[in-house]
Structure formats: structure tokens, C-alpha cells
Amino acid sequence: MRFASVTAFLLISLLAVAAWAAPWIVVDPQFQKTTVDVTSIDTAGIHPAAGAALLKWENVLQLDTSSSAPATPGDYTLYMTDGDRLTGQPVSLGNDSIKWHSAVLGDIDIAVGRLLGFGKGNAIPDTLEESRKEDAVKFANGDSAAGLITSLTPDGIALQSASGTPTLPLANIAAVLFASSPNAPHPQRLFRLRLPNNESITVTSITLDANTAAISIDGKTTLNAPAGSICGIEQLNGPVTWLTSLHPIENIYRPFFKENFPARFDRTVAEGKPIHEKYPAFHHGIGCHSYSRLTYELDGSQQAFRSQFAVDTDSQLANVNVRIYLDYVDEKSTPAFEEKGIQAGAIHSAVTVPLKGAKTISLEVDYGKNFATEGRFIWLDPALLKSLPGAETPTTQP
């Protein structure tokens, strides 16, 4: 009798898992959104409920859902070169990787080459994105030191410099910034997982069911996290390549006076806020200020560039001119897209520019009629598409 009861319980549990489905908003390569009841996700794609056809990854750009997991931020925030970030605690450093304890993922090893640094709390450290030849430590009292970090524990950091290798108490440190590493290309398909508290991590694979998300960071080690902790899954290097995942071959910022607003990737230019925090409908963006010009190499596989944009301030003094160039030579080049006198207000509708075999694309934000006054700007979800959208055409306003 007891055996029969246990068998019945297991059968009911299995049926419940099989019937489980959660609503996700699925975005296709044409940026169209559909609500889908999803039963599981794996390497083949997204499995909808009620026997609907499999959604293959080739036809999926990203997915979003409501996470059931509460945000549990840690004492520190770890920042990565691709815009990812995790809150938690530093554990150790060795073999060119840092071991980081995340409340969601547990202990996770991340290559130092992927890291910008980490800081106490959630305030973005000054000069985080600046290029540096040495590791740097910033203390809570405003002092700083540079050298080579040779070890790290929850208690302190050993910093080797010309004057020795002191151990610096972690409690006195406001931020740790790692020496710059070359941007490594990621030609293979990757997935960015969005977690509570605006955290994210890029992984090589994910499978998800009613209970568990099994993820691999490096293609070897598998970590398990509660399924409810996954807020979204974004495919990288699939049908769309986000411009923010590429390294510009030209990054020009020319202030009008002495202002200092170099481009920020996946963050706003002034406050440094994550894009999704200020613009909830978007996950990617390039914050910049007039005058700026960013140039990217094209590899021939992309058919079009698509982006929305906005002036990133409420000030009515803001006024900028925007241009998109293909194979820019100099200021006499003819833009593929141009719009002058853009002011604060609504987000601009999507602009799509066919690439027509171009070798480079340049995004320019120029001074408007009020010169550099409040010239903050944001490119929203700038993307290179592998196929031309059927419904959108480029808008050119000379």
C-alpha cells in the first residue's frame, strides 16, 4: 500500500513537470514579440506547450520572463568587459581566473581576461572602462595603488609593486581594477542570461525546465541554478550581432570645451546606468556625447544595421545631428542616414540601413545648434542583422 502511494506521488509529480509551462516573451530576428508558454529550453531551441512546434535558435533573438526569485545582491559587484556583472563576494584568484561567489550561481570561475574589476556596493568605480597596463586598487579613503595582484582572499589582496608585496585588507578597499586585456572574439553562439538585480552572465550553453537551469560558462563545467532566477535569455552571435559585443576600430570623442563624456557601452554616458534600468524596452546601447564617432569593421556576413536612438536628457537645450556612414573617409563622405536637430523627447523609431557590401560602419553624433550643450545621446539596441528585414526600409533625411 505504501509502495502504491509513493508510485502515485511520483507519477503525479512527473505529470506536473510535464504539464508545466511559463509565459515568455520571445523576440524573433525581425524584432517582433510573441508571448509563448514554454515548457523547456535546450540546445535545440525553445519547446512550447500544447504540442506547438519547436522554436529553433535560428529564429529566436531573445526571451524575457518574470523571475520568481528575489534579488539578493552581495557586498561587491563584479564587472566584465562584455557588459555583464554579478554581485557577490570575491573568493580567490589563481590560474588566470577569479573565483566569485554569487547568491544565484554559487561559486563560479571567470577568466581574468573577461574582467574589468569589482567594487564595493553597486556604484560603478571611476575609470572602470579606461585602459590600464597594471592592476589598480582604490581605497575607501580616496588613495590608490598600482601593481600586479598576486593573490586574493575574502580577507585581503596581495599587490606586488616596486616597493614590495603588501597584503591589503579587503575591508579598506573600494574597488579593484584589472589590467586591460585584448578583446577576444567570440565567433561561436553564446547566451547571455539575465538575472535579478540587473545582473547578467554570458554562457556557452543552457538547458532549462520547471525546476533547474543548467548552464556552462566555459563549455566544460556545468552549474545549476533555480529556474526562477532566469529573467531572460539572449542569443549572441546568432541571427543578430549586437554592436556592443564588438570592439570599435575607431572611438573618437571630441569635447567642445573641457567636458569629459567618452562613450560607454551598455550604459548611459552620464549616470553610467545599465541600459535596461533607464530604458526598460531595451537591453543594449551605446551612451555617447557630441562630438563622437564610432567605427566598426564588417565581415561581410551582415546585411543591415538597425538601431533606435534618443537624446539622453530632458533638457530642451539638447540638440544633436546624427549620421550613419558606410566606409567613412572624411567629413565630406555622404552619410547613409542623417537626421539633424534631434532634441529631447520620444525615442526615435527604428532606422535600418542596408550594408551593401560595406567594409565599415561609422556612427556619428555631431554638435547641433546649441553646440555641446546637453549633447548626451544613446544608441539603443544597435545591431548588425544577417538578413534584411522585410518590413523596414532605411530612412534618410539629408
Image: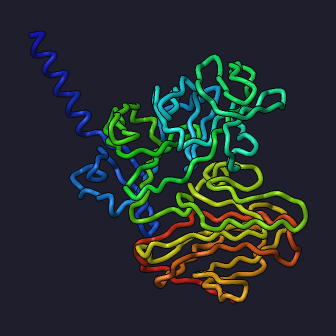
Looking at the image, can residue 347 be seen?
no
| Percent position of residue 106, x then y | 46, 26
Looking at the image, can residue 277 be seen?
yes
Identified at 75% across, 77% down, the residue is 321
Q: Nearer the viewer, residue 158 or 34?
A: 158
Q: Is residue 380 above or below residue 98?
A: below
Q: Is residue 63 above or below residue 32?
A: above
Quarter of the figure with the C terminus: bottom right
Looking at the image, which residue sits at the far right?
A: 257
Identified at 64% across, 26% down, the residue is 75
Quarter of the figure with the N terminus: top left
Q: Nearer the viewer, residue 192 or 71?
A: 192
Is 161 on the left-hand or right-hand side of 304?
A: right
| Percent position of residue 335, x then y | 64, 85
Count the marks: how many?
0
Identified at 68% across, 79% down, the residue is 323
Is 72 on the left-hand or right-hand side of 61?
A: right
Colour convention: rainbow
| Percent position of residue 172, x then y | 75, 22
| Percent position of residue 157, x then y | 65, 23
Looking at the image, which residue sits at the far top?
A: 2
Is 366 on the left-hand or right-hand side of 309?
A: right
Is 289 on the left-hand or right-hand side of 303?
A: right
Q: Is residue 100 above or below residue 41?
A: above
> Hey, which quadrant is residue 120 in on the image?
top right
